[in-house]
Image (cartoon, helix red, strand yellow):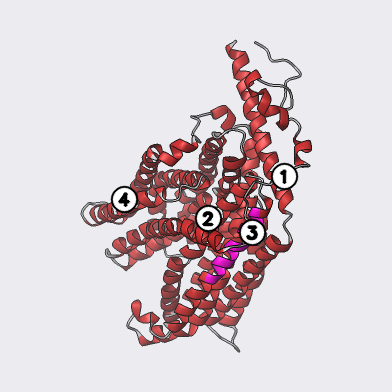
Amino acid sequence: MSLPNELNETAPLLPDTQRTLQHLNDVDASLLDIPQEVGENRRVGFRLMVSLVVDSIPVILSYILQNSIQTVSILITGRLGPEELSAAAFSMMLAFVTGWVVAMGGGSALDTLGSQAFTGGSQSTDLSIHFQRCVSLLWLLFIPVAVLWVYVEPVLLAIGEPPQLCKDVQSILRILCFGAPGYIAFESLKKYLQCQGIMRAATLVLIIVFPINIGLNIFLVHYTSLGLLGCPVALSIIYWLAFVLLIIVTSLSPVHKQNKTWGGFQPRAVFDIKSCWGFLSLALPGIFMVGTEWAAFEIVALAAGRLGELSLAAQSVIMTTDQIISTLPFGFGVVASNRIGNLLGARTAIGARNASHAIALVSVLVGFVVMLIMLAARNKFGYIYSDDEDVVVLVSKVMPLVASFQIADGLANACGGILRGQGRQHLGALFNIIAYYILALPIGISLAFNAKMHLGLQGLWIGQVIGLFTVGISEYCVVWLGTNWEKEVQKGIKRNAEEAKRRALYQHQQAMQTN
């Protein structure tokens, strides 16, 4: 049956959706009078800060476990020999910077759309549509990355890497191509749950798969003919296993059942062109936001290698420590994006504003505590990793810089999460490009290699500290002085209203075809 010519996204739709869509078709009028929810917090209080800390704990644990899965795989593979260790470590670094950034950065679009839809959508199942769109589009975005991984050997040879290393890295990444969709799906499902306040499910799954990952790596790497290639095979299996287990945990979750956010597979709504474009307009800046920061630290690691074995060893100690500690501010950033998105979706502008300041304050306070601990232990800290006195001394010299870095890292992650909750990932990407590639890296490399100053590793970290403080302060200025919270609420209303109209239009079309 043909559809009437006048049917479009603003036309009347199904009878059972008339009540919902009556106000959606008059969005401009509704934006003029946005109600404040009863009982919202009007000041930054102790209870609000405690709730943020409590929510962040399972998130922090989940990312520690998630990062440890690859670290353990590298350590187990490294027992084969130094060449295998280099190949595994180099492959995982490339996987992070080029592949996992699609999941972590691209998934930030779900932080915005999903969290706002959960509290402000016309139907509880709106969140599941955003989740399905997230997985599908991120899989598509990974395709060019997979092509790079399959043919990465000539690229690495062109930049002067050793031939055997290039060959081994390509072999590892080719196998990881099969595990990457599982990683992306797991990360997306984790965000889908976080958007509705279910923070512990992913942590539970990672606690289960962590020992399985150890046993599987040991078996495939050391007790089969796979050897080095046992590492990516094990990781690929683990990523898919984690995704499947998280599906099971989600289906059994009483909170998920109560929320009623799963509405089944809806491909027509998921692949709506305008909705997909709206998702990509947030996902692509999110990828740049995360990728530019990760790449900057990898460039610093490569530069440290040019300073000699001593600096490289000290940098390895510092980065290994920072990767563990950075899960603290990263966890606050995840909680920030979901909390702010939920509050904006619920039309609580004042609550969102207060929560943003509370998150920034908590992150800075935690960073300050970590800084004091690192400063107190700076002279002995290097012994945890090495007995070499020269390494320990160099670590102690750089540690004050790394310690001060924790305050900036806390502020930057918290404010970055707030921007993701608002849907302003492009600002985070812009600040990272300016701070790291115009300020931090040129300053750090100049200080490290300048013949007169020759600060070495300290120079590189001075640059990074300048860069991260620039990011943190700039983002907080935007949150504090450059945010119209009422306008952000209005933007969330428009997003949810447009999604509801498109979904209702598809429902109308299906009903007409059925009749």
Distance from disc 4 to disc 2, alpha carbons, whole Å, reads 22 Å
Q: Which residue lies under the disc numbered 1?
A: 490
Distance from disc 4 to disc 1, alpha carbons, whole Å, reads 42 Å
Q: Which residue does the image show at 70% across and 49% down from the upper left?
A: 488
Q: What element carries label 3?
A: helix
Report the amino acid beneath label 3: Asn
Distance from disc 1 to disc 2, alpha carbons, whole Å, reads 23 Å
Q: What element carries label 4?
A: helix
Q: Does the rendering let one see residue 229?
A: no
Report the amino acid beneath label 1: Gln
Decide which of tag 1 and tag 2 comes sooner along the chain: 2
Q: Please identify the quadrant where the N terminus is shown.
A: top right
Q: Where is residue 401 in the image (x, y as percent from the top left)?
A: 53, 79
Q: Which of marks 4 and 3 is in front?
A: 3
Report the amino acid beneath label 4: Ile
Decide which of tag 4 and tag 3 comes sooner along the chain: 4
Residue 354's disc number? 3
Magenta residue span:
351-365
Q: Which residue lies under the disc numbered 4?
A: 208
Query: Which quadrant holds residue 509?
Result: top right
Nearer to me, 291 or 384: 384
